[in-house]
Amino acid sequence: MRVFFVLNRVFYRGGVELGHGTQTAGYLLFDFKIDMYRFYDLEDVWGYVEMLLREVCEQNAETDVSVAKNLVDYLEQHYADDISLGELAKGRYFMSISYLSRLFKEYTGQTFAKYLTKLRMDKAKRFLECGRMAVGDVAVCTGYSDASHFAQIFRKTYGVSPREYQKRFLKEG
């Protein structure tokens, strides 16, 4: 019974759906005691517990993916802001930085810092291709307050300075 009460609390807090139907936490809250009468032996009870645990794990996995997807979407819109994984973990997602970092890497295949740098460099490349913005302005628009630091990262990423890239692209275009 204690196992069922613990599972009930987990489901009740998360509002998880069970099985193929629309059974929610409310179902568990009131009906799992009635279900106990349909089991003939302890093996049937453990099968039921395993099914419940699988549902909890699947729900948590879906939640983890949605958190990572949400973070990717957030970065896409806020890449120019002063962003740190620690601040996002604490203030936006309410989880430990190591857990959020692991979720993010599993979802994207990259660390948070590498993903953000790549995203910013991709955006910078697009701004430079427009030809209307100075390199310092592109740096600020992509989240870098120091234009020389921006230029170093750009050169490391693409093998040319931002100014050289812009000139080459405008000549070819």
Image (tube, grey):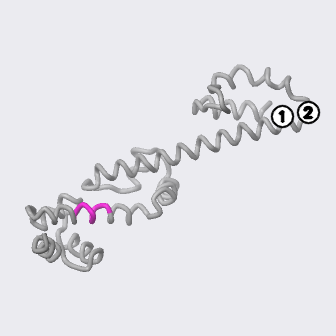
Q: Amino acid at mark 2?
A: Asp
Q: Amino acid at mark 1?
A: Val
In this rendered view, identify the residue nearer to me: 58 or 90. 58
Q: Residues within 10 Å of mark 2 (few under 14, many from 20)?
A: few
Q: Badges 1 and 2: C-beta atoms under 8 Å apart?
A: yes
In this rendered view, identify the residue nearer to me: 69 or 100. 69
Above or below: residue 52 compared with residue 83 = above
* Cα separation between marks 1 and 2: 7 Å
The magenta span reads 119-124
Q: Report which quarter residue 8 is drawn in.
A: top right
Locate the C terminus and report the quarter of the image it occupies. bottom left
- Residue 41 disc label: 2
Above or below: residue 97 compared with residue 14 = below
**Where's residue 121, x and y in %?**
27, 66
Horizontal relation, residue 107 to residue 6: left or right: left
User: Mark 1 sits on what residue?
Assistant: 45
Main SS of residues in magenta: helix
Above or below: residue 5 compared with residue 130 = above
Above or below: residue 37 compared with residue 45 = above
**Where's residue 42, x and y in %?**
89, 36
Locate the N terminus and report the quarter of the image it occupies. top right
**Where's residue 118, x and y in %?**
33, 65
| SS category of the residue bearing label 1 | helix
| Residue 121 covered by magenta stretch | yes
| SS category of the residue bearing label 2 | loop
- Residue 12 disc label: none
Horizontal relation, residue 112 to residue 121: left or right: right
Extreme residue toward the bottom, this view: 159
**Residue drawn at (17%, 69%) of the image:** 147
